[in-house]
Image (spheres, rainbow, N blue to C red):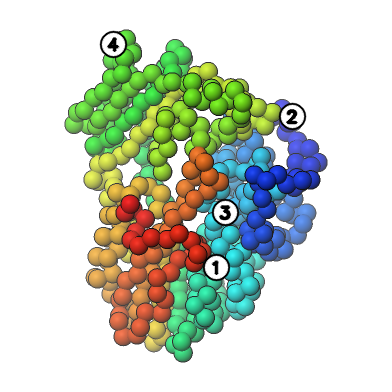
Amino acid sequence: MNTPDDLEFPPDFFDPPATRPDFWPDNPVLRRAVDWFKSFIPPEEWKQRRERAARRLYLSAMGRKDESSDGRFFDKRDSFGWYLFLADALLDHIGNYDYVFGSRVVPVLEAIGRDLDLLLQVGGIESRVRRMVAEDRAQPNGSLFELLVAACYRRAGAQVAFVEEQPGKAQTHDMDVILNGQTWAVECKRMEVGEYGERERLQLGRLWDGCGGHLANIERNTLCRVSFRVELAAVPTDYLSAKVHRWLASGQSPMAWDDDIGSGEILRLDLRPLQQVLATDLVLGSSMRILELLTGRYLRHANYRTMLRTKPGDNPRYVDACDLAVVLHWESLAEAAIGAKARDIRKKLSEATAQLPDGRPSIVHIGFEAVEGDRVERLRYEKIMATARQFNPAGKQLDYVYCHYFVPESPPDECWAFDETTQWCAINKSRPRPLGDIFLVLPAAADNRAGPHWQE
């Protein structure tokens, strides 16, 4: 790998291995989806988009930003290209794969590959995919969600056809479905993670980065855990720095606190578990594995801020050695914060209902990632049920709403894990529910359990 100022990739950088090792088997189902999506992109264009994705990823690993950087290690203007790059990397050039973000993408693409034969029989699907890989490349989640919903109806034995859009002329629903002799108009909406969580992360940086930087400057390996009882915007600016300075003055024995603002502890971080692994192996710097080795535990969807002094391997995304670590593990437990993150579906449901045709039985599907903690999802579930009971479809024949909770996970000992909860609400019970207990991403043969994902 060359210097950041002259970042070039060797000719075989994206090539599959000549001999595939046992620990890295091929995934024909995922490959079907990847090859299908690639067929909508001219080969030379795909090479350029793939290289741009790799360049952004490696510049980020080297601590550099390109001219379009916004703090992400991928270019959101081509989110679909990034998704396809991740799946392609997992298949053929795994050194470029990102396990955390890949856990959000690969299960979805694998589900599409699994049902590709069914999807190819859906009317109008090619125009939808062409739009997603090109003009909608910045926001592919909605189109991918539509494909998942279409595949679900096809598995149930339905005839499915996408409705041609009429930009600037009329609102249209997404697809027509005929199932068991009943015709349905179906509209799909994909919700993104809200802005409140991002504001929390920015505020946490203002509260921690100064004192965390001080700990790094004086070379104190430190682990700090904090649970906030109030919204982060209400936390005094010196709250964490005061705790850090008190701990330093006390001789750095483990220190715990519990007050009106929050509770937590500060202690010396033991680098030995990580260093023992690094003596024989490399560890991906942006992985749950390195956090598990630093903190002694793995927690799904936990929030961390880290400052590490590392020696990169030949691949700069991987850590060869580490001799300094300052780690903050934080959680926001204020009722107001949980309520703000547990976004209701009312707005999306209203938008979807407005696109439904008059005088036709209709269904709305709403999907979202549930990655902000089980407390948030319990409250969201209650909000959705309350909204469904009170919702007025304004004369539209909206019969059912299906809500799909997607729960991607990147365990330290697995490539990815995925959980899913489906919640349905009857708005008008004049017709039987068209779909029973369904999943959009998980296969029918998966080891499923009763109840939502937040119930152990």
Q: Which residue does the numbered mark 3 point to in the structure image?
A: 106
Q: To which quarter of the image does residue 37 belong?
A: bottom right
Marks 1 and 4 sit apart, C-alpha to C-alpha, by 58 Å
Give SS at disc 2: loop
Residue 182 to residue 168: above or below: below
Give SS at disc 4: loop
Mark 2–mark 4 CB contact (< 8 Å): no
Give SS at disc 3: helix
Marks 3 and 4 sit apart, C-alpha to C-alpha, by 48 Å
Instruction: Using a 10 Å C-alpha cutoff, classify the residue at mark 1 as few (fewer than 14 neighbours), some (14 to 19) or many (20 or more).
Output: many
Q: Which residue does the numbered mark 1 point to in the structure image?
A: 147
Q: Residue furthest front?
A: 22
The quadrant of the rendering that contains the N terminus is top right
Q: Is residue 83 left or right of residue 399?
A: right
Q: Position of residue 186 (x, y in %)?
A: 45, 76
Q: Which residue does the numbered mark 4 point to in the structure image?
A: 250
Q: Amino acid at mark 1?
A: Leu
Marks 2 and 1 sit apart, C-alpha to C-alpha, by 40 Å
Give SS at disc 1: helix
Marks 3 and 1 sit apart, C-alpha to C-alpha, by 14 Å
Task: Judge depth for marks 2 and 3 and give the one in front.
Answer: 3
Residue lying at 78% horizontally and 37% vertically, measured from the top left: 10
Q: Nearer the N terminus, badge 3 or badge 1? A: 3
Residue 44 to residue 17: above or below: below
Q: Position of residue 376 (x, y in %)?
A: 31, 50
Q: Is residue 241 visible?
A: no
Q: Nearer the N terminus, badge 2 or badge 1? A: 2
Q: To which quarter of the image does residue 66 belong?
A: top right
Residue lying at 61% horizontally and 26% vertically, measured from the top left: 280
- Residue 2 tag number: 2
